[in-house]
Amino acid sequence: MDIEEVKRTFKDEWVIIRVLSTDSLGQPLQGEVIAHSKERDEIYKKQRELHGDIALFYTGEIPKEGYAVAFRD
């Protein structure tokens, strides 16, 4: 799955992929989704169990500089 497809499929989620190909700067271009969740802590916990060439990222919009984000349970 290419990275843009991962972002569309798992919108506003944390994703871990096994990296299958990268660009000349080492940025992932394609990967196999290993785990995804709206809960960051779930993904961080899963990441500790994994080894190899993986990438973890958030597919949602990152707040612009000067804005604050609040999370609640």
Image (cartoon, grey):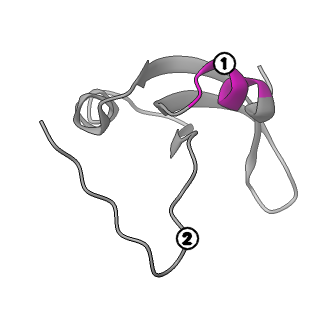
Q: Is residue 72 left or right of residue 31?
A: left
For marks 2 and 1, give the CA distance.
Answer: 23 Å
Query: Which residue lies at the image location 23% right of the left edge and 48% below the top edge?
Result: 71
> Extreme right residue here?
24
Residue 15 drawn at (x, y percent): 50, 31
- Secondary structure beneath dot 2 equals loop
Q: Which is nearer the eye, 20 or 3?
A: 3
The picture quadrant where one finds residue 38 is top left
Residue assigned mark 2: 64
Q: Which is nearer the eye, 73 or 55?
A: 73
Q: Quadrant of the N terminus?
A: top right
Indicate the amino acid at tag 1: Thr
The picture quadrant where one finds residue 53 is top right
- Secondary structure beneath dot 1 equals helix
Provide the residue span drawn in magenta.
Answer: 5-11
Query: Which residue lies at the image location 50% right of the left edge and 63% below the top edge?
Result: 63
Residue assigned mark 1: 9
- Does residue 22 belong to the magenta stretch? no
Q: Is residue 26 left or right of residue 69?
A: right
Disc 2 versus disc 1: nearer the observer: 2
